Amino acid sequence: MQKLIALFYRGLDILLALLLAGMALMVFLNVILRYAFDSGIAVSEEMSRFFFVWLTFIGAVVAHHHHMHMGMETVVAAFGRRGRMVLMGLSEIVIIGCSAVLFIGTWKQLPINMTMGAPVTMMPMGFVYGTGLFTGAGIILISLERLFRLLTGRMSDAEFARFAGQHHDAEDIEGRAS
């Protein structure tokens, strides 16, 4: 199961790299065409914006998986293990709530967005704004899994260190464990 999860995140990393490369290539090509030939490709402007939205929303799931979002590390670091457990639990509950709002809002808005076409490509805007479904569901699943491991005592010391912003300590703990 862990290999399948790792493969999934590896696929997301590749997708993010492709989206970034596609976005950069389209913008660069449009700049060259504008300055050199006084023309441009309208589709590339729209698609680069869409790629940026997808990049951001998919990247949020990957960042949450890797504990890379902003946190109040100074506050968390002041607590011991038990305090960190409570703060981590509260944090995951708040994250689940916020992600649920994103998911439900996207779900309610999706039928409207599927009927609206993008100005240039006429692609249904639901394909752009629908990324909130992936992001909301992905972050909820990650947080539920963390909350489960926290409540059952399966959370590693390395993950507690990462939560407190002690990334170098987490690497040391993981290095000793392997």
Image (cartoon, rainbow, N blue to C red):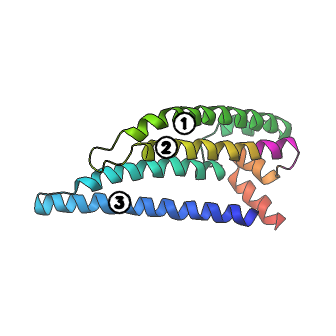
Residue 78 in view here? no
28 vs 68: above or below:
below
**x then y, percent, for residue 7:** 65, 66
Q: Amino acid at mark 1?
A: Trp
| Residue 24 tag number | 3
Q: Amino acid at mark 2?
A: Gly
Left or right: 105 as drawn, with respect to 6: left
| Residue 130 tag number | 2
Residue range in magenta is 146-154
Task: Count neighbours of disc 3 (C-alpha within 10 A) and say few if under 14, some if 14 to 19, many if 20 or more.
Answer: some
**x then y, percent, for residue 133:** 56, 43
- In the image shown, does 168 or 143 lie closer to the viewer? 143
Left or right: 118 as drawn, with respect to 62: left
Q: CA distance from mark 3 to mark 1?
A: 30 Å
Q: Upstream in the sequence, badge 3 or badge 1? A: 3
- In the picture of the structure, the residue carrying the numbered disc 1 is 107
- In the image shown, does 98 or 67 lie closer to the viewer? 98
Q: Amino acid at mark 3?
A: Ala
Residue 168 in view here? yes
Q: Quadrant of residue 114?
A: top left
Q: Nearer the viewer, mark 3 or mark 1?
A: 1
Instruction: Name which residue lies at 47% across and 63% down.
Output: 17
